[in-house]
């Protein structure tokens, strides 16, 4: 039997949702005040990573509160420190925050984050998350989205540790690739999918990883914030 909500019940539900949202916002505002106080209390001899860590969390909180213009300079400063400290995963995370700030250079930040997330052996979940942003920000017929999704599948497979987390991340990446196939070429069956993958050479990492460089170049537009060759020289040999 279908149950109908009375108008007052609908109003109660909306009010509850609003109260919950306002409560979460107030909690985040409180956390932001505490983070800023912690940053202000840091002694002069505090480590660079202590400072960058607090800046990163302040930037994240401001971005979630939709104050991207305030979050940007703080997260950008943290990024510089993290790169100096060779904290590649945290640096990629900083780029993700900068992307979510929705500022003029946010796509440039995304390109930097993807470069870091693919170049260095960091947590593949961070890398896959950044690559999924390309799918969100490109037209339906974009080959770049297909390349990004294929790279996400590749990283989930070769970098994630065996177990439930690898299965979860791999499933997400495969779903992402399937989504791109449907919107790119109206793929609906497994046979169509296999042909589409073969046609775009998404089954050959040596080819689609080279094409990913072009995707990153389009995002960054030659406005690199760091020397890629110098950073690549710091890649662990093992």
Image (cartoon, grey):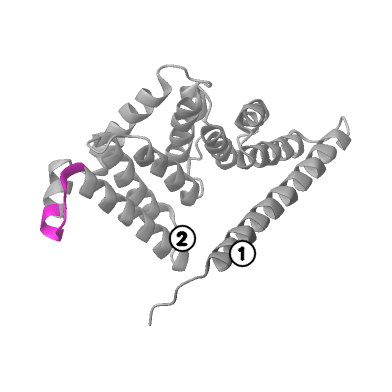
Within-10-Å neighbours for mark 1: few <14, some 14–19, many 20+: few
Q: Quadrant of the N terminus?
A: bottom left
Label 2, secondary structure: give it: loop
Q: Earlier in the sequence, mark 2 or mark 1?
A: 1
Residue occupying the far bottom of the picture: 1
Range shown magenta: 184-192
Residue 231 horizontal side relative to residue 177, left or right: right
Within-10-Å neighbours for mark 2: few <14, some 14–19, many 20+: few
- Residue at the image point whose x is 49% and y is 34% from the top: 113
Q: Quadrant of residue 133?
A: top left
- Residue at the image point whose x is 83% and y is 35% from the top: 46
Residue 173 at x, y percent in the picture: 35, 53
Q: Which residue is mark 2?
A: 161
Residue 59 horizontal side relative to residue 144, left or right: right
Instruction: Identify which residue, 153 or 28, lies in the foreground.
Output: 28
Q: Quadrant of residue 62?
A: top right
């Amino acid at each position: 039997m279908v149950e109908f909500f009375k108008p007052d019940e609908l109003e109660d539900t909306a009010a509850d949702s609003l109260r919950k949202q306002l409560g979460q916002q107030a909690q985040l505002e409180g956390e932001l005040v505490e983070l800023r106080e912690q940053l202000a209390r840091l002694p002069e001899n505090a480590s660079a990573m202590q400072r960058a860590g607090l800046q990163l969390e302040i930037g994240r909180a401001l971005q979630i509160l939709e104050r991207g213009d305030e979050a940007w300079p703080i997260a950008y400063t943290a990024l510089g420190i993290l790169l100096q400290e060779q904290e590649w995963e945290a640096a990629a995370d900083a780029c993700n925050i900068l992307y979510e700030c929705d500022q003029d250079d946010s796509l440039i930040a995304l390109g930097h984050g993807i470069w870091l997330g693919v170049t260095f052996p960091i947590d593949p979940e961070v890398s896959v998350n950044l690559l999924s942003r390309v799918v969100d920000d490109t037209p339906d017929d974009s080959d770049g989205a297909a390349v990004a999704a294929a790279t996400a599948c590749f990283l989930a497979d070769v970098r994630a540790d065996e177990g439930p987390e690898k299965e979860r991340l791999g499933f997400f990446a495969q779903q992402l690739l399937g989504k791109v196939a449907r919107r790119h070429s109206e793929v609906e069956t497994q046979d169509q999918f296999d042909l589409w993958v073969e046609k775009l050479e998404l089954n050959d990492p040596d080819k689609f990883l080279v094409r990913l460089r072009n995707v990153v170049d389009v995002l960054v537009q030659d406005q690199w914030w760091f020397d890629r060759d110098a950073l690549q020289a710091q890649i662990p040999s093992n």
